[in-house]
Image: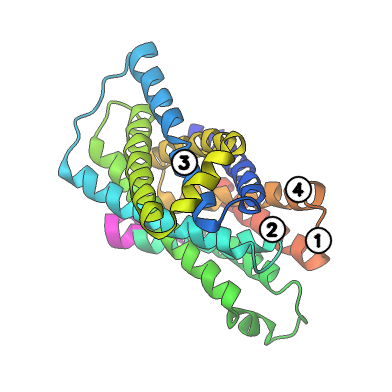
Amino acid sequence: METWVAITVTAAFLQNVRSTLQKYLKGKIGTTGATFVRFGFGLPFAFLFLAILYYAMGYPLPALHWQFAGWIVLAAMAQIFAQALLIHLFSYRNFAVGTAYSRTEPAQAALFGLVFLSETVSWVVLIAIGISVAGVMLISVARTELRPSALVTSLATRSVAIGLCSGTFFGIAAVGYRGASLSLGGPNFLMQGGVTLSAAITFQTLVMLVFMAIRDPGEIKRIAAAWKPALAVGFVGASASFGWFTAMTLEKAAVVKAVAQVEMLFTFASTYFIFREPINRLEVGGCIAIVAGILLLLLA
């Protein structure tokens, strides 16, 4: 197994754990607060990872520049919007299906990769991504009458619109982080990923603190009261992001995000075993299509 594949699968698992914890937190604090803990409480862990790479492993720090800063601002803001929209989706449908709506991210990342980085993917990869996306869309109509117009009908709903917008921002963020990491030029994918993570999460924390201080100061107090689960979210979230950034330094963002669809398996497991939400056959079929797309991608 290639290094980036192992890192991606691990990051996907950790991201599912983080999403599960964030759903729990949303019952105690608002959408903004649940979004913030992913960044604010992940900040110390991001710098801990960076310190380990620098002091324990002896990797030198790369020189920062304005191009790197530009990529970070673009990707970090896109991720904030994407994460907030995804958490907001939990109010519309069950945990698994709500998460699934944002899974057009790989297809959109392929488009943004072409636009921003002039990166192309083969037809086989596009077909693999298409199969996975088809599985996601099957999940989106799993609780409606399955007839030819069902897919179109489901796309007209508010929850799908929010999910697709979330996927767009996630796609922009993925390509932006790859652009930032590659712009550093070294010394290796671990340090590039660590520096990118630390810069991004610092910027996101500052932006969201200012936003909450202006819009809802009380949310900061609610976050402080829920610091124990928030700290868990921060650690798992920072670990997952470190995995994403290092993987996307090694491979195109669209390809990494296509393999990351394996998270849906972890999501369905969380939905069934933790939240005790029923899953029907069409949702299972959609999940199988996602797995088939991933397998095709890896075999290619």
- On screen, residue 295 above or below 238: below
Q: At x 82% / y 65%, what residue is drawn? A: 281
Residue 279: numbered disc = 1
Q: At x 38% / y 41%, what residue is drawn? A: 201
* Amino acid type, callout 1: Ile
Of label 2 and label 3, which has the lower sequence position?
A: 2
Please provide percent x and percent y for residue 91. 64, 65
Check contact, mark 2 vs mark 1: CB within 8 A.
yes
Q: Quadrant of the N terminus?
A: top right
- Left or right: where 209 falls relative to 282: left
Which range of residues does the magenta coloring cover?
Answer: 113-123
Of label 2 and label 1, which has the lower sequence position?
A: 2
In the picture of the structure, the residue carrying the numbered disc 2 is: 96
Please provide percent x and percent y for residue 115. 30, 63
Q: Is mark 3 on a helix, strand or loop?
A: helix
Residue in the foreground of this view, choosing between 261 and 97? 97
* Amino acid type, callout 3: Trp
In the picture of the structure, the residue carrying the numbered disc 4 is: 269
- On screen, residue 124 above or below 263: below
Judge whether residue 72 is colored magenta: no
Please provide percent x and percent y for residue 10. 58, 36
Please provide percent x and percent y for residue 187. 28, 26
Residue 298: numbered disc = none
Task: Give how far apart the Cα atoms at labels 2 and 4 are.
Answer: 9 Å
Task: Give how far apart the Cα atoms at labels 4 and 3 are.
Answer: 22 Å
Residue in the foreground of this view, choosing between 24 and 266? 24
Task: Give how far apart the Cα atoms at labels 2 and 1 are.
Answer: 9 Å
